[in-house]
Amino acid sequence: MNKKEFVIICARGGSKGIPNKNIINLNGKPLIAYTIEQSIRCFKNVIVSSDSDEILNVANEYKNVSILKRPRSLSLDNTPKIPVLKHAIETLGIKSNIIIDLQPTSPLRSDSSIIKGLRLFKETKNCDNVVSVSE
């Protein structure tokens, strides 16, 4: 794969606080569906990485989304995000210096916030990453 920007949505199946939180029904559809749909609206290259067949089945309903089953060892409670992203990049042979990591648990984020963050990243010299947060 050799395109400009890639969205990687990392969605683990083993949430302890809210079981199956990434596929819990929110206003008629699975929570992760909001992030997938937003990603498709904003970008061409969307990947969902998960250890959960249920989450990957939801992602597979979208024709422009690649799915990646990740190993259990990268889906533990204490697994950092960087190795998960690295696994997707290496497994899929992604050649890009722009990886967008969107949390599946943020359904109220706006498309314009994502595009604004990408623009900021591209326009800022010596910038390694951009992180968006809100109260």
Image (cartoon, rainbow, N blue to C red):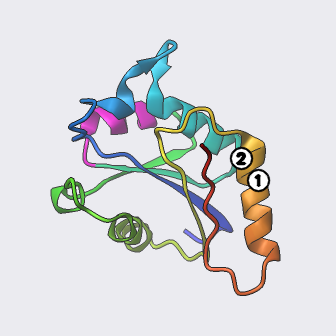
Q: Looking at the image, is mark 1 or mark 2 earlier in the sequence?
A: 2
Looking at the image, residue 48 lies above or below residue 20: below
Q: Position of residue 108 (x, y in %)?
A: 62, 32
| Circle nearer the viewer, 1 or 2 | 1
Dominant secondary structure (helix, strand or loop) of the stretch shown in magenta:
helix
The amino acid type of the residue labelled 2 equals: Cys
Is 60 a magenta residue? yes
Indicate which disc residue 42 carries: 2
Residue located at (25% from left, 62% from top): 79
Residue located at (55% from left, 38% from top): 35
Local packing at callout 2 (Cα closer than 10 Å; few below 14, some 14-19, many 20+) is some
How many numbered discs, if any? 2
Question: Toward the viewer: 86 or 61?
Answer: 86
Residue located at (57% from left, 43% from top): 64
Residue located at (68% from left, 68% from top): 4
Would residue 7 appear left or right of 104 to someone viewing this image? right
- Identify the element where label 1 is drawn: helix
Q: Quadrant of residue 122?
A: bottom right
Give the extent of the magenta segment. Answer: 51-61
Would residue 121 appear left or right of 28 to someone viewing this image? right
Q: Quadrant of residue 55?
A: top left
Is 65 a magenta residue? no
- Identify the element where label 2 is drawn: helix
Quadrant, the N terminus? bottom right
- The residue at which mark 1 appears reads as 115
The amino acid type of the residue labelled 1 equals: Ile
Indicate which disc residue 132 carries: none
Q: Is residue 61 visible?
A: no
Quadrant, the C terminus? top right
Q: Residue furthest front?
A: 135
| CB contact under 8 Å: marks 1 and 2 | yes
